[in-house]
Amino acid sequence: MSGVGDVRGGVDDAAVDGLTVGEVSAHLGVTVRALHHWDDIGLVRPSVRTTAGYRLYTAGDLERLHRVVVYRELGLGLEAIRSVLDGGDTDVPTALRAQQAQVTERIERLRQLSVGLERMIEAHERGLLLTAEQQAAVFGSDWNPDWPAEAREKYGDTAQWRQYAERAATRTPEQWQDVVDTVTELDRALADAMDAGVEPGSPEANDLVERHRTVFSSSYFTLTRQMQVCLGRMYEADPRFTAHYDTVRPGLAGWLRRSIDANARAHGIDPDTASWE
């Protein structure tokens, strides 16, 4: 390129050999908007203005633009790029090593994010991210490792399953053990109340029903009182749940169902018309 002049003064169009903003944009794959911004902040300015008012980039300008593009693709910010290009005493390798360290940290964060996403996907698909051995150790020998898959098949499209899966994705075997311990303690309190002759609908029974709802909501998914009624009916009707509660105390499933119904009535809910919300 030849015949260039200072950007502050115009030169004869016929004497100018340079590239317009649009031509540079197409040549470098940089948006016109970015070129204008770099011009505004003084990072790279067209060195020539013709008498017709066109601003043109010279060979030197293009060389600087190439370097800006390279450093930008490496992740350097515009001020860091300015320092590299204009700072005579700038230690470029040091600046690049600092950028490399940031990239390495970002890669590690993305790796951890990928692992988290994979666990979330598996939790939505499987429900429980424990091996069969871990499940037996946490939930006991009576636990059937096929139950989570059955639940996924039946409830996988519900909001409750999604909430459960999101919690399960981050739980360790130790945290699941904490859940089991909390539920076991609740079961013991329910059995003790039944043994003591606590009547469904009494303040003590209602407190235990509310405790049951709180424990369930914090362990699995948010349980409303209407949903709790439906769950209580299932406890009594499903042989697997009945067997669990009968192991704790014979007749406990029926007592818990009656207590849940009575508590629901106290809150204006007709158990016979309660629905899963």
Image (cartoon, rainbow, N blue to C red):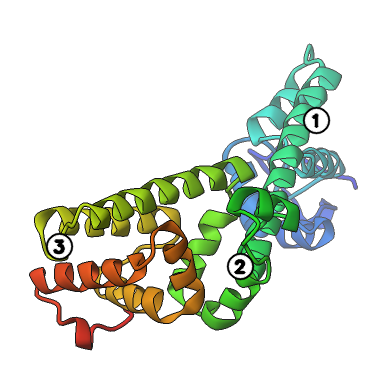
Percent across and percent down for residue 152 are 59, 75
Q: Is residue 149 left or right of residue 251?
A: right
Q: Which mark is residue 100?
A: 1
Which amino acid type is shown beneath numbered disc 3?
Answer: Glu
Amino acid at the residue labelled 1: Gln
| Disc with the residue nearer the chain's start (2 vs 1) | 1
Circles 3, 1 touching at the beta carbon (< 8 Å):
no
Q: Answer with mark 3 or mark 1, whichever residue precedes in sequence.
A: 1
Is disc 1 placed on a helix, strand or loop? helix
Residues at marks 3 and 2, CA–CA distance in whole angstroms: 40 Å
Q: Nearer the viewer, mark 2 or mark 1?
A: 2
Seen in the picture, residue 45 relative to 168 is either above or below; the reply is above
Q: Position of residue 115 (x, y in %)?
A: 72, 50
Apparent side of residue 1 relative to residue 148 in the rendered image (left or right) = right
Q: Residue at x 71, y 46 (%)?
A: 110
Q: Is residue 60 visible?
A: yes
How far apart, in angstroms, are the residues tagged by discs 3 and 1? 69 Å
Per the rendering, the mark at residue 199 is 3
Left or right: residue 150 versus residue 179 is: right
How far across and down, in percent of the image, does residue 67 sit? 83, 38
